[in-house]
Image (cartoon, coloured by chain):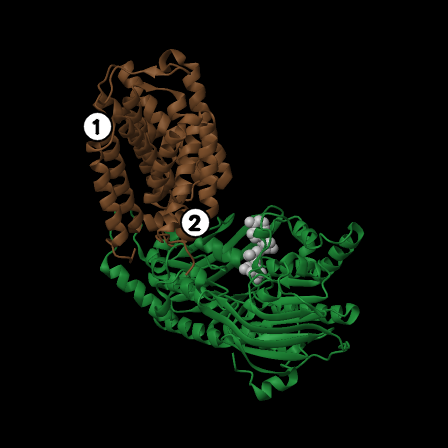
Chain colours: A green, B brown
C-alpha cells in the first residue's frame, strides 16, 4: 500500500530551481533510495516532504492526506521522522535526554516524565548501540555515535516513514554495515524509508527502488541494477567509478628525498583519556601518505596536534624544525593547510569570500589566479560564488572546504575525510586534481580517511591507526594483502 | 533530569534560603532594604534568564516587561484609585500582554535582529512615558497613593517570598519535560519542529512566564518605593544590571541569577562611599569574575551542566 505519494513538487531558491517537478511514491515497508550529484536537490526534496521547506507547487500525500505546505510539527505527528544531513543534538543535555525529547508529547501540560518514556528512550538507545553513553553529553561522542543518536531520536517514536539524509556519510565500512542492518530491521518492522546517500554500494544493497536526480529533475527510476546502468545517471553521477576496481592509481610524480614532516608523538591526553600513544610517522616531500582508521581512532587528534591545536608530549619536526610550542597561525603560514572534517566554513560569508580569506596571505594578483584555479577544479563553486556558505548543499560545502585549504598554497595539505558527502564523480575530479597538483607543484598530502578505496588509490604509503596507536604501516599496494580491505 | 531531585547542592540552597529568612532578627533595616532590592533584581534576572539562558532569545529589553508591570500597576493605583492588591495584577497583566507582543518577532527574527526589536520596545515605552508625562510623571516619576507596607521587615518578606516562589516555579519548569522542549526550541527550531513540537506554543509559554514574573516584580517594586520612575524600572542601567547579574551568576542557572543579583546590589552598597565611581567599579569586578569563572559563580560549585565530560 502506498504510504507516501509525491507528485510534481517544485522549489525555487532565488534564481535556482532546486527541485523541479519531482514525483515518486513509497509503499509501506519499502526502502527507496534517492541519488544524484551534489546540489541536485535531494536534501531539498526531503525538506519539502518534511515541511521544513514549503513547496512552490505540487502535492504530497502521506497516508492519503495532503500535507504539502503543512507545518513541520503537524507532519511529524502524523508519523514522519527525519535524520538531517548534519547532526543536530542538544549540546547541553545528555544522550538520554536527547532521546527522551523525541518521545515527549506536544503539550505544555507536562511537568514530569512518565516511566514509560524513560523506558522507550532506553530501548531506542539500545537498538542503535548507545546504551553505554546515555549520561554523556553529545560533544564528547565520536562522530558515529552522533549519527546513532540522530537515528535513535528518529526511530524512538516509531514513525511510519523515515527520511534519512546521508546516514552513512563519515562512517567506516563496519559502521556502515551496522547501520544497514538497523535499517533492514526497521523495514522488516513495516516502516517505509527514503534514503539519500552517496555510498551507492550500501544503498544498492538496501533499497527496493532508486530515484535518480540531476539539477532538480528526476532522470531515472527503477531497480538498483536499472538505475546504476542508466546511461544518463552514469554520465552525471558515477563517472568511471563503477568500472574502476580498487587499485592504486598510476603515479607519475616523483617523491623527493627530503623529509618534510617527522612526527614523534609520545602521547596526547584529553583529561584522563589518552587519545594518542607512540605515534611515529613521517612524510617525504611530494609524497601522498594516508592515515586510515575507524571513527574515534585518533586521526583528527593527530591533525590537531600537527597544527598546534592540542598539547602533546613528544616532538613534531617540520622541514627540519621543531613545531613544539608554535602557534597554529605560524604553523599555517609555514606551509601546512588543514581541510577539517567539520568544515569550519564561515557560514554567513559567500563562497568567494571564504576562498579569499583562505588566500589572505597571497598578494592580489596571486589570490585571483588561485581562486580561478579552484573554480576550474570545482566549476560548481563558480556558479555559487555569491551564495552564503550555509545555503550550500552538503557536497558543495565540502568542495569549498577543500578549495579554501588549497587557497593557502600549502606545501603540505592535511585532508581530514575529504570525500565525506561527495558524489562519486566529484571524488573522481578531486582525485584527478590532487594528481595534477602533485605533478605540477610537488604538493605533499597527508590524508585521514575511512574511505579505504580512496586512500589506497592515491597513497604511496599508509598508516593504520587503532584506538590511538599505530598498528601497521607500509606501501599502499601491500595494504590489501597484509591488512585486508575489510579491516575498517 | 536524571539527576536526583534532591542532592547535596539542593540541601545547601534550602539551608541558605532558610537562613536568609531569619535575617530580620539579626540585621538592620538598612540591610533589609538592600536585600529587598536584591530580591526584586533577582526575580528580574531569573525571568530574563528563562528567555535568554534557557529559551535562547536575545532579549535586550527586560525593562520593557518590568516597566509595563511597574507603570501598569502605578497608574491603576494613582488614576483609577485601585488598591494595591488590584493594581499589582493589573500591572502583571500589562506585562504579560507585552510579552505576548514579543512572541511574533521572536519567531520570525533570529539572535541580534530580535534583540533590536526588544531594544526598540524599551525605547518606545520610555518615549510614551515621556510623552504622556501628565499621566506617567515623566522623568520625575509617578508618586503612588499607596505602598505595600512601611515595615522594612514586611517589605523584605514580600520581596524574598516572591523571589522564593519564582525560583521554585522556574526550577520545576526548567527541570521538567517542558523545560527540555523549551531549550530545544531555543537551540534548533527546525529540528524541534521535526520532532513534532509546535515551537510557537512553547515560545508563547516562555514569554508569558517570563513576562508574568518580570511584571509582577516590577509592580511590587514600585509599591515598595512608593514611586514609579524610569530610572528604577525602565532605564538602560537597569537592563545592564539584570544582564550582568545573570551572566556573572551563571547563565542557564536559577540559583546563579540570584547569586549574581545579590552580589551586584550588595557590592554596590559597599562601594557607595566612592560615589560616582561605584557603578564602574562594580562593572570591573563583574568582568574579573567572568575572567576567572567564565561560566559564572555557579560553575565554582560544579553544578554546571554545560561542562564538557
Ligand atoms: N536556502 C537556500 N538558498 C539558496 N540556495 C539553496 C538553499 N538551499 C539549497 N540551495 C541550493 O539548492 C541546491 C540543491 O541543494 P540540496 O541541498 O538539495 O542538494 P543535495 O542534492 O542534497 O546535495 P548534496 O549531495 O551535496 O547534499 C544546491 O545547489 C544548493 O546550493
Ligand atoms: Mg544533501
Residue B15 appears in the rendering: yes
Q: Mark 1 lies on which chain?
A: B
Given residues A10 and A358, the one toward you in this image is A358
B287 is higher (above) or lower (below) than A238? above
B62 is higher (above) or lower (below) than A390? above
**In the displayed image of the protein, which residue is found farthest to the top?**
B134
* Label 2 residue SS: helix
Disc on the earlier residue, 2 or 1: 1
| Residue placed under numbered mark 2 in the picture | B187
Residue A342 x %, y %: 55, 60
Ligand 1 found in image quarter: bottom right
Q: In the drawing, does residue A67 fall left or right of residue B77? A: right
Q: In the drawing, does residue B92 fall left or right of residue B133? A: left
Residue A411 x %, y %: 73, 66
Neighbor class of circle 2 (other Cα within 10 Å; few <14, some 14-19, many 20+) is: many
Q: Which chain carries label 2?
A: B
A151 is higher (above) or lower (below) than B49? below
Amino acid at each position: 500500500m502506498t504510504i507516501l505519494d509525491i507528485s510534481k513538487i517544485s522549489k525555487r531558491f532565488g534564481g535556482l530551481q532546486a527541485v523541479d517537478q519531482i514525483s515518486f511514491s513509497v509503499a509501506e515497508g519499502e526502502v527507496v533510495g534517492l541519488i544524484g550529484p551534489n546540489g541536485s536537490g535531494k536534501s531539498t526534496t526531503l525538506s519539502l516532504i518534511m515541511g521544513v521547506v514549503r513547496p512552490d507547487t505540487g502535492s504530497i500525500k502521506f497516508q492519503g492526506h495532503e500535507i504539502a505546505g503543512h507545518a513541520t510539527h503537524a507532519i511529524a505527528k502524523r508519523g514522519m521522522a527525519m535524520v538531517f544531513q548534519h547532526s543536530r543534538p542538544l549540546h547541553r543535555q545528555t544522550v538520554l535526554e536527547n532521546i527522551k525529547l523525541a518521545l515527549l508529547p506536544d503539550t505544555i501540560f507536562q511537568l514530569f516524565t512518565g516511566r514509560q518514556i524513560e523506558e522507550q528512550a532506553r530501548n531506542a538507545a539500545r537498538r542503535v548501540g548507545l546504551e553505554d553513553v546515555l549520561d554523556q553529553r553529545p560533544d564528547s561522542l565520536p562522530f558515529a555515535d552522533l549519527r546513532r543518536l540522530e537515528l535513535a531520536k528518529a526511530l524512538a517514536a516509531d514513525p511510519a516513514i523515515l527520511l534519512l539524509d546521508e546516514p552513512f556519510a563519515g562512517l567506516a565500512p563496519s559502521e556502515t554495515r551496522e547501520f544497514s542492518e538497523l535499517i533492514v530491521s526497521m523495514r522488516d518492522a513495516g516502516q517505509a524509508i527514503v534514503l539519500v546517500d552517496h555510498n551507492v554500494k550500501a544503498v544498492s544493497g538496501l533499497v527496493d527502488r532508486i530515484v535518480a536526480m540531476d539539477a532538480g529533475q528526476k532522470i531515472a527510476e527503477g531497480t538498483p541494477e536499472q538505475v546504476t546502468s542508466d546511461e544518463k545517471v552514469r554520465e552525471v553521477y558515477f563517472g568511471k567509478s563503477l568500472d574502476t576496481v580498487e587499485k592504486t592509481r598510476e603515479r607519475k610524480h616523483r617523491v623527493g628525498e627530503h623529509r618534510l614532516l617527522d612526527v614523534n608523538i609520545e602521547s596526547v591526553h584529553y583529561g584522563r583519556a589518552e587519545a594518542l600513544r607512540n605515534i611515529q610517522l613521517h612524510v617525504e616531500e611530494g609524497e601522498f601518505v594516508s592515515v586510515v582508521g575507524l571513527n574515534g581512532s585518533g586521526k583528527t587528534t593527530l591533525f590537531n596536534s600537527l597544527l598546534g591545536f592540542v598539547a602533546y608530549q613528544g616532538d613534531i619536526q617540520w622541514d627540519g624544525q621543531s613545531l613544539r610550542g608554535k602557534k597554529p597561525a605560524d604553523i599555517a603560514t609555514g606551509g601546512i593547510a588543514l581541510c577539517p572534517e567539520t568544515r569550519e566554513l564561515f557560514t554567513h560569508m559567500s563562497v568567494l569570500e571564504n576562498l579569499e580569506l583562505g588566500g589572505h596571505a597571497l598578494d592580489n594578483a596571486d589570490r585571483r589566479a588561485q581562486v580561478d584555479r579552484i573554480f576550474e577544479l570545482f566549476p560548481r563553486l563558480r556558479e555559487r560564488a555569491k551564495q552564503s556558505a550555509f545555503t550550500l548543499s552538503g557536497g558543495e560545502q565540502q568542495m569549498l572546504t577543500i578549495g579554501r585549504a588549497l587557497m593557502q598554497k600549502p606545501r603540505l595539505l592535511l585532508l581530514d575525510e575529504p570525500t565525506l558527502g561527495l558524489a562519486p564523480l566529484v571524488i573522481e575530479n578531486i582525485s584527478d586534481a590532487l594528481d595534477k597538483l602533485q605533478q605540477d607543484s610537488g604538493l605533499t598530502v597527508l590524508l585521514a580517511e575511512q574511505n579505504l578505496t580512496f586512500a589506497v588509490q592515491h597513497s604511496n604509503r599508509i598508516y593504520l591507526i587503532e584506538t590511538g596507536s599505530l598498528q601497521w604501516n607500509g606501501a599502499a599496494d601491500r595494504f590489501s594483502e597484509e591488512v585486508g580491505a575489510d579491516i575498517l | 533530569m536524571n539527576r536526583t531531585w534532591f542532592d547535596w547542592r539542593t540541601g545547601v540552597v534550602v539551608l541558605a534560603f532558610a537562613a536568609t529568612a531569619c535575617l530580620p532578627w539579626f540585621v538592620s533595616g538598612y540591610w533589609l532594604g538592600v536585600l529587598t532590592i536584591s530580591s526584586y533584581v533577582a526575580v528580574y534576572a531569573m525571568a530574563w534568564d528563562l528567555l535568554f539562558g534557557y529559551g535562547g532569545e536575545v532579549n535586550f529589553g527586560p525593562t520593557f516587561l518590568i516597566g509595563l508591570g511597574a507603570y501598569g500597576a502605578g497608574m491603576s493605583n494613582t488614576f483609577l484609585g485601585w488598591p494595591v492588591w488590584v493594581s499589582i495584577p493589573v500591572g502583571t497583566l500589562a506585562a504579560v500582554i507585552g510579552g505576548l507582543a514579543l512572541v511574533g518577532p521572536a519567531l520570525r527574527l533570529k539572535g541580534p535582529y530580535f534583540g533590536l526589536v526588544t531594544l526598540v520596545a524599551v525605547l518606545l515605552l520610555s518615549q510614551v512615558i515621556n510623552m504622556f508625562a501628565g499621566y506617567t510623571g515623566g522623568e520625575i516619576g509617578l508618586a503612588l497613593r499607596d505602598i505595600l507596607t512601611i515595615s522594612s521587615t514586611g517589605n523584605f518578606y514580600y520581596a524574598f517570598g516572591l523571589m522564593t516562589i519564582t525560583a521554585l516555579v522556574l526550577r520545576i519548569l526548567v527541570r521538567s519535560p517542558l523545560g527540555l522542549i523549551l531549550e530545544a526550541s531555543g537551540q534548533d527550531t527546525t529540528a524541534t519542529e521535526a520532532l513534532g513540537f509546535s515551537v510557537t506554543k512553547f515560545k508563547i509559554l516562555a514569554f508569558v512566564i517570563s513576562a508574568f514574573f518580570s511584571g509582577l516584580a516590577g509592580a511590587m517594586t514600585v509599591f515598595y518605593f512608593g514611586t514609579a520612575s524610569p530610572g528604577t524600572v525602565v532605564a538602560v542601567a537597569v537592563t545592564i544590571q539584570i544582564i550582568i547579574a545573570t551572566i556573572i551568576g551563571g547563565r542557564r542557572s536559577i540559583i546563579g541569577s540570584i547569586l549574581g543579583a545579590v552580589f551586584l546590589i550588595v557590592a554596590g552598597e559597599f562601594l557607595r562611599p566612592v560615589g560616582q565611581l561605584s557603578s564602574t567599579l562594580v562593572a570591573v569586578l563583574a568582568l574579573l569574575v567572568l575572567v576567572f569563572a567564565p561560566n559564572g559563580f555557579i560553575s565554582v560549585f560544579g553544578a554546571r551542566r554545560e561542562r564538557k565530560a
